[in-house]
Image (cartoon, helix red, strand yellow):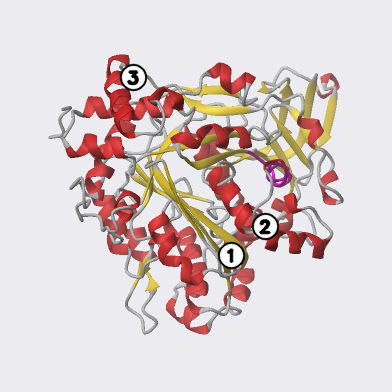
């Protein structure tokens, strides 16, 4: 069956297209329609006064794994009270929805791919099982390393880089992941030895390695084993005033290897105001100009109730005094990492919260290249991902942004440069930040684009410039048509009156996007022996086979080729392969 989307403004930065043209779909792919006539279309969609984009891609959203189960247990009374008050289900929580509801909400905004950025190896099965319950949404995970005892020991005894590379590659393959993330490098482990502050150059209390050592070794490993996405870094000193210094030190520690700084807003604070906290957005932007090997996502704060969940148990322990409501959960997980759950309510008239909101917007607006800054709220930590349409309006509508700025704490307004920024995001920049750039940095060659041969993840939005009374938030909240791998999930804006019927996605087998990495099997014996001595389970219990993914976890691995994202590496010429 052939579908023709006719007469829309096609915005496809990956192909350099921003003009009125047709898009043809056959099966699960976009096809070349130059030789076709509209009479040959089985389904004709009139996209006049509409914008056509590829499906959105979220590179950092917490949607699967044990940390969500812990958060739901901790917040059960709050979630149940809210559900009763609004005559909804607990699964429909605004900030902790079930997997299926999260998939529904993503699709209703025109997103077709989402990545869980914190897959602890011993919990990888649970994470993939939960994400497999997300019909129509392709998912993937980032393997969490950098606080696991074996890696710290390998670095401490100055093991050859090739052995560390084998360990990293084995872990990525075993956990069916696509990238590697490090959270508070070494700091979670140090917290277990009662050493709470761990700056970038502070030695670990047991192993003697520094966060800088961990960053450099892991960033190198990620590049050398061929992962497209750079090392995904949650920096030291999250949320601490003055942490811009450790963020800059993290960039320097990478020694020119490509890195990605996640939820950068939380790592972008100065300490030179009478409140003890100030914006350091301009300093981080300057660092990005100096270091072309670095990208960021923002982790935008939005006002309202949410819950923060993080493997950074050290800083979640420190933040427990700010919990709202007043309860927390701090968990240790098999000496691989940790987990901290702290409920939180961001208030626009509270100075720190208001300044966090402003800093995030400063980062979006001050970084000129939309392919180096990514749209995230670190769901649910800064806000639920459903805040994206509102956030896009703040970025693309200066007058709306100025109105919102006038409503926050006046000292935060004075401490921010946000009011002096004229920039408004264009639709092409939004498409770059949410479609083509995420696909490129994740190595998804057939997604995030609309040229022939690409997967038919296609979204049709009303054009804010052509539809009277429409704003950017309404545009990106309610697409009129959504295709996921060619399956027509939303048509004629049906979701505006009721949630979409996810049974329409049943013909689509769930896909887990993974990296096609390899390793030396001879190295595995050494890793297994270490696990026998120190772990509560056998090393090979971590391995999730393709058959287990499909027959047990009900998701089909879709291996992405290894390579590079195009992010510039500025590694020194003196680097050796030990």
Mark 1 and mark 3: span between their CA atoms? 42 Å
Give the residues in magenta.
Answer: 101-112
> Residue at point 63% right, 75% down?
403
Q: Give the mark toward the camera: 1 or 3.
A: 3
Badge 3 marks a residue whose secondary structure is loop
Residue at far left of view: 574
Badge 2 density bin: few <14, some 14–19, many ≥20, Cα 10 Å: few
| Residue 493 visible in the shown view | no
Nearer to me, 539 or 451 = 539
Using the image, tell me which numbered label, if any, was put on residue 117. Answer: none
Instruction: Please state, as top left, top right, bottom left or bottom right, where the N terminus lies in the image.
Output: top right
Disc 3 crowd, CA 10 A, few/some/many (<14, 14-19, 20+): some
Q: Is residue 102 magenta?
A: yes
Residue at mark 3 to residue at mark 2: CA–CA distance: 43 Å
- Above or below residue 126? Residue 362 is below
Asked if 69 appears above or below 404 in the picture, the reply is above
Residue corresponding to mark 2: 76
Please indicate whether residue 149 sits to the left or right of residue 500 in the image.
Answer: left
* Residue 519: assigned label: 3
Front residue of 534 and 484: 534
Residue drawn at 36 percent across, 84 percent down: 274
Quickly name the residue at label 1. Answer: 302
């Amino acid at each position: 069956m052939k579908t023709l989307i006719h007469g829309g403004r096609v915005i496809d930065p990956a192909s350099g297209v921003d003009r009125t043209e047709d898009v043809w779909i056959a099966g699960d792919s976009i096809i070349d329609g130059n030789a076709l006539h509209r009479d040959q279309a089985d389904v004709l969609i009139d996209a006049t006064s509409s914008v056509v984009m590829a499906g959105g891609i979220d590179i950092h959203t917490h949607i699967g794994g044990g940390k969500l189960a812990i958060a739901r247990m901790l917040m059960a009374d709050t979630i149940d009270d809210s559900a009763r008050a609004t005559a909804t289900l607990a699964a429909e929580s605004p900030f902790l929805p079930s997997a299926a509801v999260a998939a529904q909400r993503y699709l209703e905004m025109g997103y077709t791919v989402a990545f869980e950025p914190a897959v602890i190896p011993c919990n990888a099965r649970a994470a993939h099982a939960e994400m497999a319950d997300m019909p129509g949404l392709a998912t993937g995970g980032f393997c969490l390393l950098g606080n696991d005892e074996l890696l710290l020991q390998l670095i401490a005894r100055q093991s050859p880089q090739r052995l560390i590379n084998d360990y990293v590659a084995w872990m990525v393959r075993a956990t069916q992941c696509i990238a590697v993330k490090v959270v508070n490098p070494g700091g979670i482990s140090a917290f277990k030895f009662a050493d709470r502050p761990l700056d970038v150059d502070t030695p670990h209390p047991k192993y003697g390695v520094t966060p800088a050592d961990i960053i450099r070794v892991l960033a190198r490993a990620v590049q050398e084993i061929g992962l497209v996405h750079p090392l995904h870094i949650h920096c030291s000193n999250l949320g601490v005033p003055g942490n811009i210094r450790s963020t800059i030190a993290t960039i320097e520690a990478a020694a020119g290897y490509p890195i990605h700084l996640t939820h950068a807003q939380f790592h972008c604070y100065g300490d030179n105001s009478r409140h003890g906290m100030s914006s350091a957005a301009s300093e981080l932007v300057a660092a990005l100009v100096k270091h072309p090997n670095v990208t960021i996502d923002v982790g935008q704060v939005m006002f309202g109730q949410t819950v923060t969940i993080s493997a950074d148990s050290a800083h979640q322990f420190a933040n427990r005094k700010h919990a709202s409501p007043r309860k927390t959960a701090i968990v240790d997980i098999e000496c691989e990492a940790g987990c901290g759950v702290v409920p939180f309510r961001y208030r626009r008239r509270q100075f720190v919260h208001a300044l966090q909101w402003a800093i995030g917007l400063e980062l979006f607006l001050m970084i000129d290249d939309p392919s180096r800054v990514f749209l995230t709220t670190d769901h649910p930590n800064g806000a639920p991902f459903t805040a994206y349409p509102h956030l896009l309006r703040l970025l693309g509508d200066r007058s709306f942004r100025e109105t919102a700025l006038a409503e926050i704490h006046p000292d935060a307004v004075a401490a921010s440069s946000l009011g002096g920024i004229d920039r408004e995001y264009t639709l092409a920049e939004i498409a770059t930040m949410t479609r083509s750039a995420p696909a490129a940095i994740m190595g998804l060659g057939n997604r995030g684009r609309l040229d022939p041969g690409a997967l038919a993840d296609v979204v049709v939005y009303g054009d804010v410039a052509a539809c009277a009374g429409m704003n950017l938030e309404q545009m990106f909240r309610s697409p009129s048509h959504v295709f996921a791998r060619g399956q027509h999930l939303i048509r004629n804006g049906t979701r505006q009156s009721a949630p979409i019927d996810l049974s329409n996605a049943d013909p689509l087998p769930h896909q887990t996007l993974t990296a096609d990495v390899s390793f030396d099997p001879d190295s595995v014996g050494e890793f297994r022996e270490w696990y026998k001595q120190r772990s509560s389970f056998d090393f090979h219990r971590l391995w999730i086979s393709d058959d287990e993914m499909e027959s047990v976890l009900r998701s089909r691995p879709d291996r992405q080729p290894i390579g590079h994202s195009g992010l510039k590496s500025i590694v020194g010429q003196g680097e050796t392969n030990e």
